[in-house]
Image: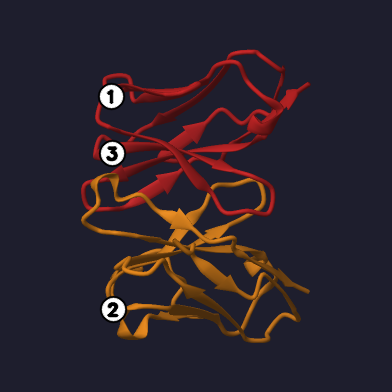
Amino acid sequence: QKEVEQDPGPLSVPEGAIVSLNCTYSNSAFQYFMWYRQYSRKGPELLMYTYSSGNKEDGRFTAQVDKSSKYISLFIRDSQPSDSATYLCAMRTNAGKSTFGDGTTLTVKP
Amino acid sequence: EAGVVQSPRYKIIEKKQPVAFWCNPISGHNTLYWYRQNLGQGPELLIRYENEEAVDDSQLPKDRFSAERLKGVDSTLKIQPAELGDSAVYLCASSLMEREGNEQFFGPGTRLTVL
């Protein structure tokens, strides 16, 4: 079983929809929780970063971390066609070791 | 600031041939990572450097893979000999160790196809 499991998708939504992306994990040593966006044939780029439990909002994006349930989420409000990409969750221990989920491919249709 | 530079962007080789990838991190970033990303999967760490020191190479297949980061700046990842299963995208990333969150900046990757 993988340390990080991500809802596989793919996910297709109409423009303006609210999108929910989710990951679960098993390693209690993870302290930092990240969401990356990856466009086709590009490297991942950091969208959101959260330390420990809680919520963080940045524009249309909200990241939630529930360490008690070992569950993290990314919400995208008012989704746009330009949000179409693969979204990767990632988690890191204090020792600096990062583990990525396998990604969820999102398509936002105009 | 200039991003992480990788070359080549694409490489096609026959199995059993050697191949090398080059990475130049963002200026001033002392931590450098090499990842392998298979189709439909997330990046998997191969090796992490802090300055010149390889601090985590536990996932590097040392029988055929080698890496170096001379002078703590750019880095080279080599595969010799390549196998069919090595076909993947090889991503380089860099970060400032001291920066909160230790944000990793990724390069565009090198897409390797082994025939």
Tell whether label 2 touches label 3 (CB within 8 Å).
no
Image height check: is B113 above or below A45? Answer: below
Discs 3/2, front: 2
Look at chain B in the picture and name its colour.
Answer: orange
Badge 1: chain ID = A
Badge 2: chain ID = B
Q: Which residue is mark 3?
A: A30
Who's the residue at 59% across and 60% down the image? Answer: B108
Query: Label 3 is placed on what type of residue?
Result: Phe
Q: Which residue is mark 1?
A: A67
Quadrant hosting residue B27: bottom left
Q: Are marks 1 and 3 on the same chain?
A: yes
User: Dot 2, crowdedness within 10 Å: few (<14), some or many (≥20)?
Assistant: some
Judged left or right of residue B81, residue B104 is left
User: Dot 3, crowdedness within 10 Å: few (<14), some or many (≥20)?
Assistant: many
C-alpha distance separating marks 3 and 2: 26 Å
For the N terminus of chain B, the quadrant is: bottom left
For the C terminus of chain B, the quadrant is: bottom right
Query: Label 2 is placed on what type of residue?
Result: Glu
Task: Measuring from the top left, give residue B44's x and y in whole percent.
Answer: 48, 55
Look at chain A in the picture and name its colour.
Answer: red
Who's the residue at 40% across and 47% down the image? Answer: A99
Task: Measuring from the top left, give residue A103's x and y in whole percent.
Answer: 57, 38
A37 and A105: which one is in front?
A37
Residue found at the far top of this picture: A17
- Label 2, secondary structure: give it: loop
Query: Label 1 is placed on what type of residue?
Result: Lys
Residue found at the far front of this picture: B1
Q: Are marks 1 and 2 on the same chain?
A: no
Q: Which residue is mark 2?
A: B52
